[in-house]
């Protein structure tokens, strides 16, 4: 394994362990040696977002996009930052721009769905979640969101199906486990009552 790859892997371990401060420090040091390494940007930005350092994350997201205007990742990050700042219209704009560059980007589709869901437009959210699933059916977060929508709409059987799929993909998805258990309890009480 090359020294460069070993370095990146060490930072990825920090991210996986949710040690975002160490990940940030680590990736910033790598950028000092190679300030145009887009791969390092793509790992640094999530560490900043997780720490709610949105102005720094925005600065690096813009730099990432400016380094490669054909890569939609910088636009997706800018959309996520705006979503976190509750600037949903701006978030939509950046997710849409990302989808113009790559209509098959499951992360942009997922984030469009999350934004529509946040604004209470469940039918549009479902549309984007389903499009994202067609491209990448290995993300438990998509199944969780679909399960939550169907739970809100009182379709508990469909809701449980999606929560169960989320749990099968990620056995540590405690939100899905909790939601699935609540649906089971609700159905049990409904059937007994």
Image (cartoon, rainbow, N blue to C red):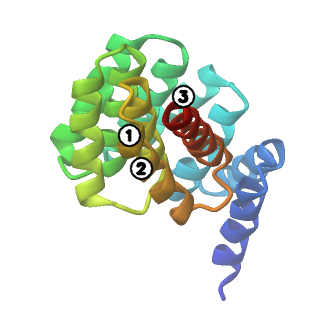
Locate residue 192: give its quadrant: top right
**Horizontal placement of 144 versus 55: left or right?**
left
Tell me the mark number nearer the camera, choosing from 1 and 3: 3
Residue wearing tag 1: 146
Quick one: label 2 or label 3, which is nearer the N terminus?
A: 2
Q: Residue at x 59, y 30 (%)?
A: 57
Q: Position of residue 174 (x, y in %)?
A: 68, 47
For the residues labelled 2 and 3, the Cα–Cα distance comes to 25 Å
For the residues labelled 1 and 3, the Cα–Cα distance comes to 27 Å
Q: Quadrant of the N terminus?
A: bottom right
Name above or below for residue 22 compared with residue 74: below
For the residues labelled 1 and 2, the Cα–Cα distance comes to 6 Å
Q: Quadrant of the C terminus?
A: top right
Q: Secondary structure at mark 3?
A: loop
**Horizontal placement of 39 versus 122: left or right?**
right
Q: Please tell me the numbered disc located at residue 157.
A: none
Q: Residue at x 63, y 46 (%)?
A: 44
Q: Residue at x 51, y 58 (%)?
A: 39
In the image shown, does 166 or 64 lie closer to the viewer?
Answer: 166
Q: Position of residue 80 (x, y in %)?
A: 47, 29
| In the image, farthest residue toward the front | 193
Q: Residue at x 49, y 11 (%)?
A: 86
Residue wearing tag 3: 193
Residue wearing tag 2: 162
Dot 1 and dot 2 residues touching (CB under 8 Å): yes
């Amino acid at each position: 394994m090359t020294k460069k790859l070993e370095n990146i892997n060490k930072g990825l371990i920090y991210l996986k362990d949710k040690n975002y401060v160490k990940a940030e420090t680590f990736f910033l040091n790598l950028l000092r040696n190679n300030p145009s390494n887009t791969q390092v940007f793509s790992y640094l930005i999530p560490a900043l977002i997780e720490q709610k350092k949105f102005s720094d994350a925005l600065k690096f997201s813009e730099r990432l996009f400016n380094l490669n205007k054909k890569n939609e990742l910088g636009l997706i990050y800018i959309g996520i930052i705006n979503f976190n700042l509750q600037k949903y219209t701006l978030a939509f704009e950046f997710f849409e721009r990302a989808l113009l560059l790559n209509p098959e980007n499951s992360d942009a589709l997922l984030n469009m769905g999350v934004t529509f869901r946040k604004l209470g437009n469940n039918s549009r959210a479902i549309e984007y979640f389903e499009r994202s699933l067609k491209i990448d059916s290995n993300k438990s977060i998509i199944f969780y969101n679909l399960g939550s929508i169907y739970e809100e709409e009182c379709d508990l059987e469909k809701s449980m199906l999606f929560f169960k799929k989320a749990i099968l993909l990620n056995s540590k998805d405690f939100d899905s486990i909790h939601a699935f258990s609540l649906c089971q309890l609700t159905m049990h009480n409904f059937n007994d009552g």
